[in-house]
Image: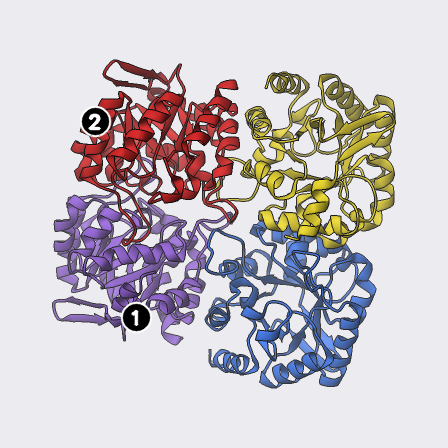
Chain colours: A blue, B purple, C red, D yellow
Amino acid sequence: MNNEFLDKFARNDVVIKTGNIVIDMKKDKLIIAGPCAIESYEQLLDTALFVKKSGANVLRGGAFKPRTYPESFQGLGDEGLKILKQVKQEVKIPVITEIMDVRDLEKIIEAADIIQIGSRNMQNFTLLKEVGNQEKPVLLKRGLSATIKEWIGAAEYIANEGNTKIIMCERGIRTFSDYTRNTLDLSAVPIIKKETGLPIVVDPSHSTGIRYLVKPMSLAAIASGADGLMIEVHPHPEEALSDGTQSLNFEEFSTLMESIQKI
Amino acid sequence: MNNEFLDKFARNDVVIKTGNIVIDMKKDKLIIAGPCAIESYEQLLDTALFVKKSGANVLRGGAFKPRTYPESFQGLGDEGLKILKQVKQEVKIPVITEIMDVRDLEKIIEAADIIQIGSRNMQNFTLLKEVGNQEKPVLLKRGLSATIKEWIGAAEYIANEGNTKIIMCERGIRTFSDYTRNTLDLSAVPIIKKETGLPIVVDPSHSTGIRYLVKPMSLAAIASGADGLMIEVHPHPEEALSDGTQSLNFEEFSTLMESIQKI
Amino acid sequence: MNNEFLDKFARNDVVIKTGNIVIDMKKDKLIIAGPCAIESYEQLLDTALFVKKSGANVLRGGAFKPRTYPESFQGLGDEGLKILKQVKQEVKIPVITEIMDVRDLEKIIEAADIIQIGSRNMQNFTLLKEVGNQEKPVLLKRGLSATIKEWIGAAEYIANEGNTKIIMCERGIRTFSDYTRNTLDLSAVPIIKKETGLPIVVDPSHSTGIRYLVKPMSLAAIASGADGLMIEVHPHPEEALSDGTQSLNFEEFSTLMESIQKI
Amino acid sequence: MNNEFLDKFARNDVVIKTGNIVIDMKKDKLIIAGPCAIESYEQLLDTALFVKKSGANVLRGGAFKPRTYPESFQGLGDEGLKILKQVKQEVKIPVITEIMDVRDLEKIIEAADIIQIGSRNMQNFTLLKEVGNQEKPVLLKRGLSATIKEWIGAAEYIANEGNTKIIMCERGIRTFSDYTRNTLDLSAVPIIKKETGLPIVVDPSHSTGIRYLVKPMSLAAIASGADGLMIEVHPHPEEALSDGTQSLNFEEFSTLMESIQKI
């Protein structure tokens, strides 16, 4: 790890601004919630209104979805981005969405307040350099089998281009363990904070893949020192076009937020 | 998994009794603390007095140590058990120690209030059956690469012989991740509770192998619903004959206990 | 790793002798074949006659079986050992069987020409010491998630007691990969030979868990320098009481042996 | 897995043509050799001449290198491509090089006879679609922790766009095992052939990361049915700018090729 970058990370404060909303990660927890994929205007609007009311401060919604097979639902694409912008304006909530293709950078910057780099692209160095060359904060998910050093190396690629507004996101690693979809490695929280000084949030939805584990893992994440959470919420998880088994419905999300506020 | 055993697990209450001390795991958190290996009477006595005062309710101390190489320190053996019994009587604290050999069962039962099955022996079915045939509570550590089902299968071997006073212990699993000694899988806490109803404690010392991670992982474990912790404490970690890098000194343990009581 | 043991390993020649049959592993490939579990006299006799005729020089057959759940078939036990001895005498073929309990050592020594330590017991140090204290050759399977160093450490426990007639057995390691039962790590073959000088055989049956992979992995093992193979063969794999999906039938084993002899 | 694609894969014959050189993978083994990174004209020319003479039929050489940290040597870029084209013409040998950025596609197509998708980009779906939209054969390396199904899914993304000239490349997976750089999963060879009918080559250099393991793993790969090998060769491995510890020198490569021809 390169000390020059570590110094930059440590000095930098990640602040998300949109309109007159300001989230300063040195003080505020980042609670990102919303559907895995944007499916319709109604779906996203309902979710945005509900999660904001319950205490989330960022809306997630995927327009471009990385899927294992080409025949799976790939997201609504440009139509999804349009919905995202519309809902953002109506609900007044900052939004995050994933970038998969460097050629989409312009339109993603225009739509999103935070740009997400997904696990599969953690070492897509081309993409890392491009998001490092613009000014929006970047949420960098840990690769499926990335070591801590490799993950920090990926953050260095972004910082190296000038953008140090980086939020790390632990989302589970791939292991032999087959009960959960991935193995949530919460030790990454104190490690990343010590090694880089960067803020780190935890995704209990993708890491476990199982609804009943989202709440206890969210509480554990906060207790371990996480700067926020990224949670899948869907009005009707059983009808979701992707990741339904791990999405919370509105009531479950509301209950979770109450529990978190108690800690 | 066998429903008959699951029913037994669920009905059973794990209670540790020694003299007039009673720990009922339906109500009380189990805070196990002490050195990895018993090194001397003074070392164990000092540690026992301190951890009890700080809030631990069980003393750990290994007499027989499973070590990767035959030339490593193997524990004090019978001499260690003698020290353990002496300290237990003087300090009035229940004790836990590991069994490695079925032929040691008699003397381990005589010395210990909880019998520990280590990770390497999680599928030593001979040993599981023997500890299932006696009445002392058994702490069953998860194997290095045991799936949830295999771990529960091991508990069934114990229960099958009649002893359902089983405490599960998550101690990290083996993965590619190389910053920590193992990867602590906290999702095991809610999973074991749901699938078996058995109490489960977490070992943040072995799972991480790094001192500064013990506190955040302890807090996370409690937040995830764990019924207790198992923590290595040594008067002088830098001089420990085994596992020094992950042992807390007295001051660190005391600070940790204060943090836990706040949750 | 301890140089003293490595020197012992290197100087030692593993020779299996029974009656006037001699297998010298410095010259001869060890082809172990037979059922996972001994089910009946007829089953073992038929298999023994066939595998010997096809070119195997050791018969395998489990009397005590380590199984994940207590309700699974645990092997015929003492009755299995009796069948093993009978078939060995009639067919005139050396036999290997697994030991799980130190208290069974006497009778296993009496029945077997090679004593097998299974993966789950690779770090059952009590058992390792006991098989190190007798004179029969020991086949030491690699643990499910054992590193090369830990595996060699286990061999040192045996050698430390005086017995250096150790045969290492690579049988697949536990990884995220879910198509096969385990991941066969063939690099272990040249590594063990270089680091210890001990002979090493490969078990393509347990490592893959799938019948059609046994032949290509056997050929690959021999090409990588393995000193032998350990293959599950059953007269009627579809009726086997354990591990049927990975057992070869007689015809498949015969075809495999022909392919091996061509290399 | 989608049967439509599997049918396409199975019907298709991967043929590499350059000038009047034709490699038909239904009949010919693909022996790819050369340096990890192109460092200079002399380095590549010397290597090309030697590996061709020794029996390789494709030259490898990276111009754009994916490296964990931004401060590591990133390849010569366009200058590297220029050297590659020059050496290709002089030595009359087909060449393979890696693509990392969709925007480089034109120039990679112009320079290379086979386009390589590296492990880190196995699920860069944008890139997969683009190489599926052109006609050069594609070598698709398995991701660091890709399951067999995910790897085939990636091949489907390419085939879905029309290009079924896909060569799969097993290059080791990420496991706990720490002696080697990765764990070579040779079972992937017969599995990929059965499940897709696509040709598959093995990279014994990256998978092991250790020079002395390249030869035994190459022999094992061929014995398991691999359609070829991809081997790092460098005139002076000890001076290589990347991956020196796993590169063969000329003499070692020559010896390896002789051994392979014997099988």
Q: Is residue C130 left or right of residue C258?
A: left
Determine which of the numbered discs, if any, sits on residue B29 in the image: 1
* Crowd band around label 2 with a 10 angstrom C-alpha radius: few (<14), some (14–19), many (20+): some
Location of residue A248 with respect to D250 vertically, above or below? below
Q: Quadrant of residue B6?
A: bottom left
Q: C189 above or below D254?
A: below
Residue drawn at 51 percent across, 47 percent down = B176
Q: Secondary structure at mark 2?
A: loop
Q: Nearer the viewer, residue B55 or D15?
A: D15
What is the chain identity of the residue bearing mark 2?
A: C
C-alpha span from label 1 to label 2? 47 Å
Give percent across and percent down for residue B96: 22, 57
Q: Measuring from the top left, give residue C255's x and y in whole percent.
A: 48, 26
Instruction: Give x and y (percent) for residue B27.
Output: 27, 75
Q: Nearer the viewer, mark 1 or mark 2?
A: 2
Q: Which chain contains the residue that carries disc 1? A: B
Question: What is the number of the mark on residue C134?
Answer: 2
Q: Position of residue C251 (x, y in %)?
A: 44, 30
Q: What is the number of callouts on the image?
A: 2
Mark 2 belongs to which amino acid? Gln
Residues flagged by tags 1 and 2 on a common chain:
no
Q: Is residue A45 left or right of residue D189?
A: right
